[in-house]
Image (cartoon, rainbow, N blue to C red):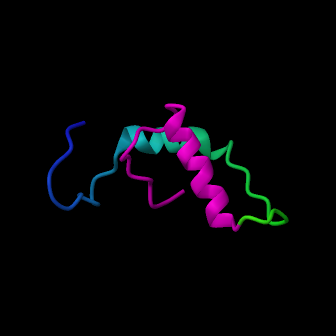
Amino acid sequence: MTRMRGRPRYDQEDVAAAEAFRSIGSKVRLNRDEAAPLWVQLCNQVEEAINTGLLAANSRIPSTR
């Protein structure tokens, strides 16, 4: 997929990113009892998915489940 300059188009889904995010979605684990806030836990897990190559950098996360 070619990246365009300017604002991203939100009327078109990034299909590859949506499939990749769905595949890691079942692996995301959030723990309310942990000291870190939920948003930090989620951020860390998405970052790990990018670093391991499961999710491409600069991918748009789907807005719906």
Q: Residue at x 63, y 62 (%)?
A: 40
Residue in view at x 21 percent, y 44 percent: 3
Any magenta on residue 57? yes
Q: Residue 49: within the magenta?
A: yes
For the residue pair 15 and 29, the one nearer the viewer reads as 29
Q: Nearer the viewer, residue 55 or 20?
A: 55
Question: Residue 56: x percent and y percent?
Answer: 41, 38
**First to last magenta residue range:** 37-65
Classify the position of the N terminus by image quarter: top left
Q: Residue at x 56, y 48 (%)?
A: 46
Left or right, residue 18 beside residue 32: left
Task: Give the image quarter of residue 36.
Answer: bottom right
Give the x, y percent position of residue 26: 67, 44
Query: Relative to residue 64, is residue 45 depicted above or below?
Result: above
Question: Horizontal and vertical percent for residue 17?
Answer: 41, 42
Give the residue at the far top of this rendering.
53
Instruction: Please report the residue visible at 60 percent of the width from the left and 41 percent of the height from the top.
Output: 24
Query: Residue 10 appears at what percent x and percent y?
Result: 29, 60
Apparent side of residue 63 relative to residue 26 in the rendered image (left or right)? left
Residue at the left extreme?
Answer: 5
Quadrant in which the C terminus is drawn: bottom right
